[in-house]
Amino acid sequence: MRTALNRCVLAATTPDAVLPGVTRLLGGAESAAAPCPVHGRVRLSARSQQVPHVR
């Protein structure tokens, strides 16, 4: 089983604050899908805090 999780976080949020919850989520998926292997991929992104440039 392959899982992909794309999560957009607030710019002030660090990955260290989000990863424990994501790890628990993937652990639950592994338990539910046992004995099948689960391959998880996580992508964290944030909106830029930069001011847009006007041209």
Image: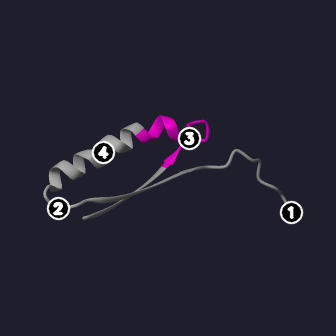
Q: Are marks 3 and 1 in contact (CB under 8 Å)?
A: no
* 3D distance between C-alphas at marks 3 and 4: 20 Å
| Secondary-structure class at tag 1 | loop
Q: Are marks 2 and 1 in contact (CB under 8 Å)?
A: no
Circle 1: residue type: Arg
**N-term mark: 3 or 4:** 3
The residue identified by callout 3 is 10
- Counting from the top left corner in percent of width and height, residue 51 is at 77, 48
- Please check the rendered image and state whether residue 17 is part of the magenta-colored stretch, yes or no: yes
**N-term mark: 2 or 4:** 4
Point out the image quarter for the N terminus.
bottom left
Circle 4: residue type: Leu
The answer to whether 44 appears left or right of 26 in the picture is: right
Bounds of the magenta span?
8-19
Q: Which mark is residue 25?
A: 4
- Counting from the top left corner in percent of width and height, residue 24 is at 31, 41
| Secondary-structure class at tag 3 | loop
Residue 21 lies, with reference to residue 54, above or below; the image says above
Q: Nearer the viewer, residue 32 or 47?
A: 32
- 3 vs 1, front mark: 3
**N-term mark: 2 or 1:** 2
The residue identified by callout 1 is 55
| Secondary-structure class at tag 4 | helix
- Counting from the top left corner in percent of width and height, residue 25 is at 30, 45
Point out the image quarter for the C terminus.
bottom right
Q: Are marks 3 and 4 in contact (CB under 8 Å)?
A: no
